[in-house]
Image (tube, rainbow, N blue to C red):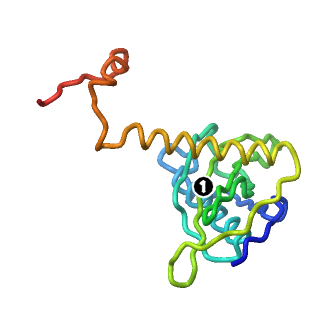
Amino acid sequence: MENNFVYVEDTKITISELMLPSHANFSGKIHGGYILNLMDQIAFSCAAKHSRTYCVTASVDTVDFLNPIEVGELVTMKASINYVGRTSMVVGIRVESQNIQTGKVNHCNSSYFTMVAKNDQGKSILVPGLIVTNDLEIRRFLKAIKRLEMKRKRTAEFDSEHFTPETYLKELENQNVKVELNN
């Protein structure tokens, strides 16, 4: 695929679903796993819409459940492409719940799914570039770059081949951990 460009606006997808008792956990709140499943579906749809091909989930970053979701609430998920690399895309997803009777809306989660475009043989393929048109879209693109840089740095820092626990023991002193090294 030649590397053409797509406007962020053209990647946006919104889905809404009424939360049913069958989606609830033992405490009567909507099960986080069910919400993650819906988020994965919208991430796939958004990435496939942008790349016009099949996509797979490569990673999920920053899944913080901020507010519980109740049975009977309307959950709305909004997704758009925040960043594109060569074969990958970061899909930003915002999850909101709305009490249908009161109209009150709660922000429940914001998350970032990294999706990779695949061809019919399962090989990663190039994705179209992204056209950003405002400060928010530029900020989202830059934040994705920073998350990727931090992830690479963390992976390199704690690479098992070069990692020495003694370097970090001081950092563990005020944590809820007991170190018993078997030398």
Residue 99 is drawn in which quadrant? Answer: top right
- Left or right: where does residue 18 sit relative to residue 153? right
Picture coordinates of residue 48 (x, y %)?
68, 71
User: Which residue is nearer to you in this view: 78 or 127?
Assistant: 127
Identified at 57% across, 75% down, the residue is 118
Quarter of the image that includes the N terminus: bottom right
User: Which residue is nearer to you in this view: 121 or 75?
Assistant: 121
Picture coordinates of residue 177 (x, y %)?
30, 23
Q: Is residue 97 above or below residue 117?
A: above
Identified at 43% across, 43% down, the residue is 155
The amino acid type found where label 1 is placed reads Phe
Residue 161 is drawn in which quadrant? Answer: top left
- Left or right: where does residue 14 sit relative to residue 167? right
- Left or right: where does residue 183 sit relative to residue 161? left
Q: In what element is the residue under mark 1?
A: strand
Picture coordinates of residue 21 (x, y %)?
59, 56
Q: What is the number of callouts on the image? A: 1
User: Which residue is nearer to you in this view: 128 or 55?
Assistant: 128
Identified at 73% across, 71% down, the residue is 3
Picture coordinates of residue 24 (x, y %)?
55, 52
User: Which residue is nearer to you in this view: 26 or 146?
Assistant: 146
Crowd band around label 1 with a 10 angstrom C-alpha radius: few (<14), some (14–19), many (20+)? many
Identified at 63% across, 67% down, the residue is 44
Quarter of the image that includes the C terminus: top left
Q: Is residue 169 above or below residue 97?
A: above
Q: Which residue is mark 1?
A: 113
